[in-house]
Image: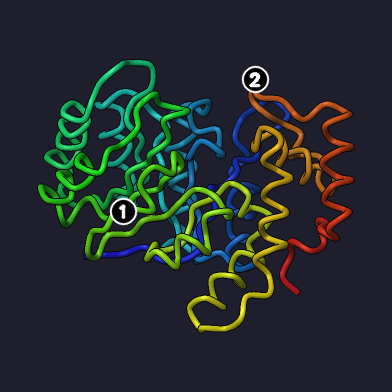
Amino acid sequence: MSKINGIYAAGMSIFNEDLSLNIKKTIIHSEEIIKNGCHGVAIFGSTGQAQLIPISEKINFLNHLSKSNYKENFIIGTGLNSLGEIINLLKISLSLGFNKFLIMPPAYYNYEDEEVIKFYSKIVEALPGVEIILYNFEKLCGYKFSLSCVSELVKRFPDQIIGLKDSSYNLYENLKIKNFSILPGSELKLLKGLELGCSGIISATCNVTAQLSRKVYDDFILGNKQSYDKKLFDVRNIFDKYNLISGLHTFLSKENKIYKNLVPPLRLLNQKEERDLLDNLKNINFSIKSTKAA
């Protein structure tokens, strides 16, 4: 069974002024993150504003992404509530050679473990070739995975349920399943998670911390003394004071104005927030230049 290990960014989506998805720049952005140290990128997660992007644009994007030299490094999210639309998007993705997917249970409705198991069962029954990373983020969908729910899904579908992104942080310390990837959603959990047996992280701020995160990961794997974990913590703590999407787009827009384009109701940081963010990052010697590979 496949396992996912390492540093993964929750990839950002880049938009044109008319708020259509800029396919070329989004792919370039994702490929640069990988060049800068990430093992891969999760496309169309919450950081990528997936819920706000039309399905037709997602399909067009995936057709272009399938030609990337880094194709094997991508995990595809859906950002959809409809079971039928999720299955259709996965079918297209599979036909393009993608097989690893980050899927969150539907938002808005109230449900419990039994219904979640049925939801994923329907996906696997329709598409047995999928490999799914469960997306545990109660803040966004209203449901929080339990240990028993994850264990039951893996028991039923050991070849298809291959990992979990834990952004609710109620599982990564206690969930122990052989050959199953557990990836917390923050750099703050990276080192602790690795020490507990986790596989790495999938994080929004890895869009700018790829180098730092990779150094912390590699030093752990190699058994070296940690020299970069404090700065990595400091950067994440600063971004955590704001909406992460707003903060990342504001930060990166200082170099390229196209990052200013956000789909409403999302917005950039206001002037005070922007000044505070940039000043705090400057105080720890973190800048656009420091995010790039030498």
* Crowd around label 2: few <14 · some 14–19 · many ≥20 (10 Å): few
**53 to the left or right of 174:** right
Task: Residue 138: tell me if it is visible.
Answer: yes
Q: Which mark is residue 163?
A: 1
Reply above or below: 26 against 242: below
Residue visible at 71% across and 37% down in the picture: 241
Q: Which residue is mark 2?
A: 264
Kind of residue at disc 1? Gly
Residue visible at 15% across and 55% down in the picture: 158
Q: Position of residue 8 (x, y in %)?
A: 50, 58
Q: Position of residue 122 (x, y in %)?
A: 15, 33
Viewer-nearest residue: 153 or 87: 153
Q: Residue furthest top?
A: 109
Viewer-nearest residue: 225 or 140: 225
* Crowd around label 1: few <14 · some 14–19 · many ≥20 (10 Å): many
Kind of residue at disc 2? Pro
Residue 90 is drawn in which quadrant?
top left
Say which quadrant the C terminus sits in.
bottom right
